[in-house]
Image (spheres, helix red, strand yellow):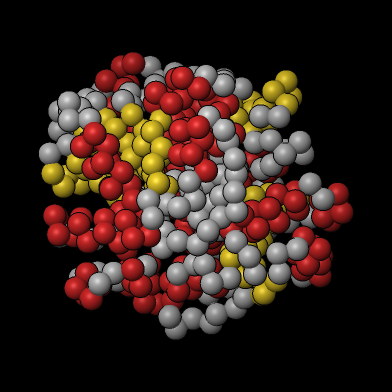
């Protein structure tokens, strides 16, 4: 399987090159030259398969011969070694829990798969791989754990000062070894811009072998399709055949992966793109005018993205067909006050505690169901992070019932190491050149 840049459709590269290049020089994003269909028999019988078996089938279909099957299976078995259960909360309302991996966030799917793919492709004696990643919260922690100790790699994580939770910051800054953290005096969009600019800087590319671990990297997007197929498999076991997914959306990689799964043949009735006050996409779906804007800080910090990188991939999948796009995707946004109310309402209704991103997806699904009383599909909202990462958003009763995993408690005693930079590219470039 070859991949093309969204800005140069006629130029094709193999999977390995797309993974290591991450961002094409023309500043597009890589997409598969063709998106094959999974065979109907597999979809109809998907309930028979485990998550690793589903992941292998999907990856093998999409990547064809990019990695030999035996090696691909070993990569998946090592990377996707934790559960992603669908939990029923009420009739036709389910939560897909994606926080059971090592960093307690859905980003573990992409980061662990990508790190193992890169390690597989790296050859002894090759130039060190410098992985740059911007994070608004959870990406950095997942990437750090995914690459920690991987030979011949060095990871630089950029995060916005004062805009990640204390636990998220600990996950970024306490790793040591081949992981280093940079606190940027700016927003996530500033961090993302620095990473993108680095990939097109000739001097940096001459000195370093740069790649990205953000969802702009196609190796991050592909494994995120796995849990959509696995959720459908679990629903089929309960006799459910129609599904609506409500997805907390920031940089739009998560819902982009869901749409890629749909293109591969996953039957999905509706996608709901649920955002916070950073509502660039919901506004576009209403007006037809795409207007990126500076991001604003919210309680759901991992979604504080004003110019979502992955929207170009979604637009590419629909080839400009706005009617089809708007039929399949509904966009909604919620304020911080509405987010807190959703947290409390879900706790009252189910004695279930959500992180603020998950609460937005739950509220969006409940509102969509209320607006479509005739709809009988299984509504699934994605729980993207463990609530322990956001203790400041909960009332005392809710906070007292959160069970903090042991790996989080262990972080508190570790050494905290971070570099501080402004949001200018010259400063970031100097840091990279002088800390090689």
Q: Quadrant of residue 159?
A: bottom right
Q: Quadrant of residue 430?
A: bottom right
Q: Residue at x 48, y 36 (%)?
A: 256
Q: Quadrant of residue 234?
A: top left
Q: Position of residue 26 (x, y in %)?
A: 76, 36
- Quadrant occupied by the C terminus: bottom right
Give above or below for 133 relative to 434.
above
Horizontal side, residue 21 vs residue 179: left or right: right
| Between 357 and 118, the one nearer to me in the picture | 357
Q: Residue at x 57, y 33 (%)?
A: 289
Q: Is residue 78 visible?
A: no
Q: Position of residue 230 (x, y in %)?
A: 31, 36
Q: Residue at x 42, y 52 (%)?
A: 276
Q: Position of residue 94 (x, y in %)?
A: 21, 43
- Quadrant occupied by the N terminus: top right
Horizontal side, residue 1 vs residue 395: left or right: right
| Between 56 and 392, the one nearer to me in the picture | 392
Q: Residue at x 75, y 53 (%)?
A: 198
Horizontal side, residue 23 vs residue 319: left or right: right
Horizontal side, residue 373 vs residue 250: left or right: left
Q: Is residue 418 visible?
A: yes
Residue furthest front as drawn? 287
């Amino acid at each position: 399987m070859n991949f093309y840049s969204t800005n140069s459709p006629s130029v094709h590269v193999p999977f390995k090159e797309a993974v290591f290049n991450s961002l094409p020089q023309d500043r597009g994003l890589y997409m598969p030259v063709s998106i094959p269909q999974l065979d109907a028999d597999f979809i109809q019988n998907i309930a028979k398969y485990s998550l690793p078996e589903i992941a292998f089938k999907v990856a093998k279909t999409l990547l064809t011969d990019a990695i030999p099957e035996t090696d691909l299976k070993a990569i998946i078995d090592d990377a996707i070694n934790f559960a992603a259960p669908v939990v029923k909360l009420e009739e036709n309302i389910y939560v897909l829990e994606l926080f059971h991996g090592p960093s307690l966030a859905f980003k573990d799917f992409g980061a662990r798969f990508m790190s193992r793919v890169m390690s597989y492709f790296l050859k002894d004696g090759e130039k060190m791989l410098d992985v740059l990643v911007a994070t608004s919260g959870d990406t950095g922690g997942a990437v750090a754990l995914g690459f920690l100790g991987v030979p011949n790699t060095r990871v630089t994580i950029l995060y916005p000062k004062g805009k990640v939770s204390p636990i998220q910051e600990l996950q970024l800054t306490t790793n040591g070894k081949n992981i280093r953290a940079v606190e940027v005096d700016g927003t996530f969009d500033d961090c993302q811009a620095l990473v993108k600019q680095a990939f097109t800087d000739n001097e940096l590319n001459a000195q370093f072998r740069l790649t990205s671990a953000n969802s702009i990297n196609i190796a991050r997007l592909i494994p995120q399709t796995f849990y959509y197929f696995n959720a459908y498999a679990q629903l089929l076991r309960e006799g459910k055949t129609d599904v609506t997914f409500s997805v907390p959306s920031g940089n739009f990689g998560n819902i982009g992966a869901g749409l890629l799964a749909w293109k591969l043949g996953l039957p999905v009735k509706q996608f709901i793109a649920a955002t916070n006050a950073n509502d660039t996409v919901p506004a576009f779906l209403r007006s037809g005018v795409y207007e990126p804007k500076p991001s604003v800080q919210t309680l759901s910090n991992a979604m504080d993205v004003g110019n979502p990188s992955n929207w170009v991939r979604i637009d590419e999948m629909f080839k400009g067909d706005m009617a089809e796009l708007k039929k399949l995707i509904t966009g909604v946004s919620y304020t911080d006050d509405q987010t807190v109310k959703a947290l409390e309402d879900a706790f009252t209704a189910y004695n279930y505690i959500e992180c603020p991103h998950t609460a937005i997806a739950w509220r969006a699904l409940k509102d969509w169901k209320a607006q479509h009383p005739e709809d009988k599909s299984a509504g699934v909202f994605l729980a993207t992070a463990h609530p322990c990462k956001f203790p400041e958003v909960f009332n005392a009763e809710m906070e007292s019932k959160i069970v903090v995993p042991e790996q989080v408690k262990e972080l508190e005693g570790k050494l905290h190491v971070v570099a501080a930079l402004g949001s200018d590219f010259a400063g970031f470039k100097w840091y990279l050149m002088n800390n090689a």
